[in-house]
Image (cartoon, rainbow, N blue to C red):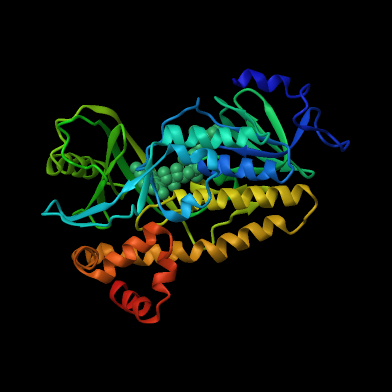
Amino acid sequence: MTAGVLSVFMEDGHGHAASTDSAPAGVIWDVLVVGAGPAGSSAARVAAEGGASVLLVDRARFPRYKTCGGGLIGLSLAYLPASVLPTVEPQVREVRFSLRGGRPKSFSRSLPFLALMQREKFDDALMKAAVAVGVRFEESVVVKAVQEADGLVTVTTDGASLHARIVIGADGTSGRIGRYVGVQNRGTDLALEVELTRTPESPAYDGAIAFDWGTAPGSYAWVFPKDEVLTVGVIQARGEPQQTHDYLDRWLRTTGLEAHAVERSSGHLTQWRAPDSPLHRGSVLVAGDAAGLLDPWTREGLSYALRSGCWAGEAAADATRGSDRAIAEYSRRILAQLDPDIRAGERLLRFFERYPRLVHLALAYTSTGMRLFLAVCDGTKTLGGILSHRLLGRALRVLGS
Ligand SMILES: Cc1cc2nc3c(=O)[nH]c(=O)nc-3n(C[C@H](O)[C@H](O)[C@H](O)COP(=O)(O)OP(=O)(O)OC[C@H]3O[C@@H](n4cnc5c(N)ncnc54)[C@H](O)[C@@H]3O)c2cc1C
């Protein structure tokens, strides 16, 4: 579908007709979702399942690429519809940890502990799962502005004005809706990634991921092997782009992958919310990266995007059915269930910035560290849960402050 189809919304039967005199002419959707990444497509699907008429728009044409490692922890898997599962490659049985390009220490387990996927396929399948339950999807639609008046939200795109009772902003780190809502982020990182062609001569990464803890405070690097490509990347606090590039070059040499054909090279920001950052403004909610929902230490964001997306969709459907508490309840749910893990990740990041060697030793050389790493990957423990252990939490606070 193209943006041109927007002009026929008034005639088609997907939206509900305007029901108040003050409403502008044209279709009024129950829910309009901006951004068809994991957060947006999940929100749209769940809102439609809850009985709402839903329009989902994205500025990209699908399937679209997103710079991402594509690592899915157990918590993420629990929020996926069955039709998306075939895009998931659940094969990681080994992890290798190194410090500043040094000798890696590896650990393996017969049961896979992490799933990987390629975002083009994964996001496309999530969007199609939304369409399958009645969501209308429009690609190549760039949202420029949003405003709310008289109980109606108007979203201005590059080609039209769209109207909805509830808007969910899931437009990622560079989107417009977060700015409208007033999202405040506490930290921003720059990540650089290359997708390398896999060849029979590729160093053996079958079923094995690798992490390296870098020289710059809080930085790390990874190799995530997919069926078709090797995803290799680095991340560190934004502000030293040359240093970040140099780290990627060094990491490619360290791993012996520097001569591989680069299919794609890209960069993207990650960011995480300040504790008092809003999660909605009036009838406009934010979810996923747009809300700064991401673990500050591992920069794992998919489980946050999927969970917040599903919950935003649920809240939006409830609100259109008349609940006047649903939107405030969404904020409370995020604060109660996701924010504690973000704060724990922040504490771990501060600790890791000061003591990378200690973190490396704990993870790679102690059975407790490895057990906790695997539990987070499996989805049986969260960072918040781990740091709620009184002694551990206190030790981190003292050492990291
Ligand atoms: C290099 C890197 C590696 C990562 N690796 C992992 C990992 O291995 N595991 C993990 O869990 N997390 C990882 N993350 C984080 C993860 O990628 C994000 O948290 C996740 O993509 C968030 O999903 P989302 O749906 O909120 O946003 P996105 O996936 O960014 O989707 C936002 C959508 O909004 C659309 N959009 C933006 N602006 C507009 C507009 N104005 N109008 C219309 N549409 C718009 C975009 O086209 C996009 O499709 C990584 C991040 C980076 C940068």
Instruction: Specify the quadrant of the image occupied by residue 108.
Output: bottom left
Residue 299 to residue 54: above or below: below
Measuring 62% from the left and 29% from the top, which residue is drawn there? 137
Q: In the displayed structure, does residue 324 sit left or right of residue 99?
A: right
Q: In the displayed structure, does residue 11 sit left or right of residue 239?
A: right
Q: Is residue 37 visible?
A: no
Instruction: Indicate the quadrant containing the C terminus: top left, top right, bottom left or bottom right.
Output: bottom left
Instruction: Indicate the quadrant containing the N terminus: top left, top right, bottom left or bottom right.
Output: top right
Q: Position of residue 313 (x, y in %)?
A: 64, 47
Residue 138 to residue 145: above or below: above
Q: Position of residue 286 (x, y in %)?
A: 58, 48
Q: Which residue of the protein is positioned furthest toward the front in this rendering?
A: 110
Measuring 78% from the left and 21% from the top, which residue is drawn there? 11
**Residue closest to the eye, 279 or 305:** 305
Q: Which residue of the protein is positioned furthest toward the left in this rendering?
A: 103
**Residue closest to the eye, 392 or 346:** 392
Q: Is residue 243 visible?
A: yes
Instruction: Specify the quadrant of the image occupied by residue 35.
Output: top right
Q: Position of residue 164 (x, y in %)?
A: 72, 38
Residue 107 to residue 241: above or below: below
Q: Position of residue 92 (x, y in %)?
A: 31, 48
Measuring 59% from the left and 54% from the top, which residue is drawn there? 279
Measuring 70% from the left and 20% from the top, which residue is drawn there? 7
Number of numbered discs overlaid on the protein picture: 0
- Where's ligand 1: which quadrant? top left
Instruction: Specify the quadrant of the image occupied by residue 224.
Output: top left
Q: Which residue of the protein is positioned furthest toward the right in this rendering?
A: 21
**Residue closest to the eye, 390 or 353:** 390
Q: In the displayed structure, does residue 40 sit left or right of residue 251?
A: right
Q: Which residue of the protein is positioned furthest toward the bottom in this rendering?
A: 391
